[in-house]
Image (spheres, rainbow, N blue to C red):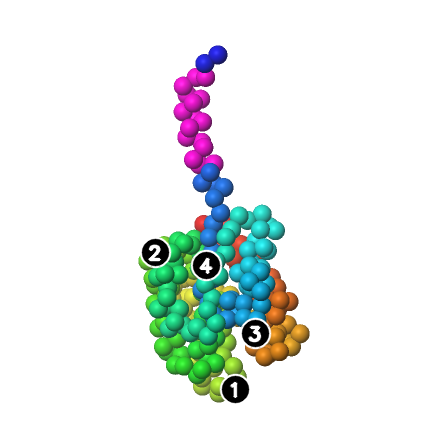
């Protein structure tokens, strides 16, 4: 019995769409040591734990670790183009911690982050901004200027904001390495749990 031409046509059309639907989305985490996984195994770092958490919820996602220890917002802006070689669908922008630790100008940090967001939006790549707070020992004038960078950028560029990347982890010895700055495995897990709902929301909108 011959298969009707109409069914052959339908089959040929449906295969590419099925394959496309099954293709995993790509998330790029552009950050510093907090995302690179300083002091941790690659499988314990934030991107790897995020990928595992998303997978456990049924999301087919590849999460790329584009974190470099010691990097600043200026460094992230400088390496943005080659970081996007895998054409991510979503970028989690988690830079600025080292700017604050070094006491760099909040105005310059804002300019660098704005340049990154602008470039991503020009390429129609969604952005999730992970906020940072300056250490309080930097002085009130400094941390007030720094802390407002992220909510202002989120409003200006209409991007979702996770207010504090280290929420629930900063200042808790049991969730950090001996240096008191970098999260341990359990700390990274808390970070992932905190930001996960927002990441899922962004993936759902893609």
The tally of labels here is 4
> What whole-number distance in Å separates the C-alpha atoms at marks 3 and 2?
32 Å
x and y, in percent, of residue 97 in the image: 48, 75
Residue 10 picture quarter = top left
Residue located beneath label 1 in the image? 137
> What whole-number distance in Å separates the C-alpha atoms at marks 1 and 2?
38 Å
Circle 3: element type? loop
Q: Is residue 97 above or below residue 46?
A: below
Viewer-proximal residue among 81 and 110? 81
Q: Is residue 154 visible?
A: yes
Residue shown at the point (48%, 61%) measured from the top left? 65
User: The magenta stretch spans which residues?
Assistant: 3-18
Residue shown at the point (44%, 56%) measured from the top left? 90
Dot 2 or dot 4: first in sequence order is: 4
Between marks 3 and 2 in the image, the one whose residue lies nearer the viewer: 3
Residue located beneath label 4 in the image? 28
Residue located beneath label 2 in the image? 123
Q: How packed is label 1: few (under 14 Cα within 10 Å), some, or many (20 or more)? A: few
Q: Is residue 77 above or below residue 6?
A: below
Examine the residues drawn in magenta and state their main secondary structure.
helix
Picture disc at residue 181: none
């Amino acid at each position: 019995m011959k298969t009707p031409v109409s069914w052959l046509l339908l089959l040929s059309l449906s295969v590419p769409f099925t394959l496309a639907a099954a293709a995993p989305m790509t998330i790029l985490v552009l950050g510093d040591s907090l995302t690179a996984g300083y002091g941790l195994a690659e499988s314990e770092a934030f991107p790897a734990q995020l990928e595992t958490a998303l997978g456990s919820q049924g999301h087919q996602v590849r999460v790329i670790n584009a974190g470099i220890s010691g990097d600043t917002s200026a460094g992230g802006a400088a390496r943005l183009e080659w970081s996007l070689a895998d054409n991510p669908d979503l970028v989690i922008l988690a830079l600025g911690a080292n700017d604050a630790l070094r006491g760099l100008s909040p105005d310059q940090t804002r300019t660098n982050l704005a340049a990154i967001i602008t470039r991503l939006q020009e390429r129609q790549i969604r952005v999730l901004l992970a906020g940072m707070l300056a250490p309080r020992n930097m002085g009130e004038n400094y941390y007030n200027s720094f802390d407002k960078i992220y909510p202002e950028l989120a409003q200006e560029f209409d991007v979702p904001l996770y207010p504090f990347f280290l929420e629930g982890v900063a200042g808790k010895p049991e969730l950090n390495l001996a240096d008191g700055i970098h999260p341990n495995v359990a700390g990274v897990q808390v970070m992932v749990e905190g930001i996960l709902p927002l990441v899922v929301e962004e993936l759902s909108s893609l």
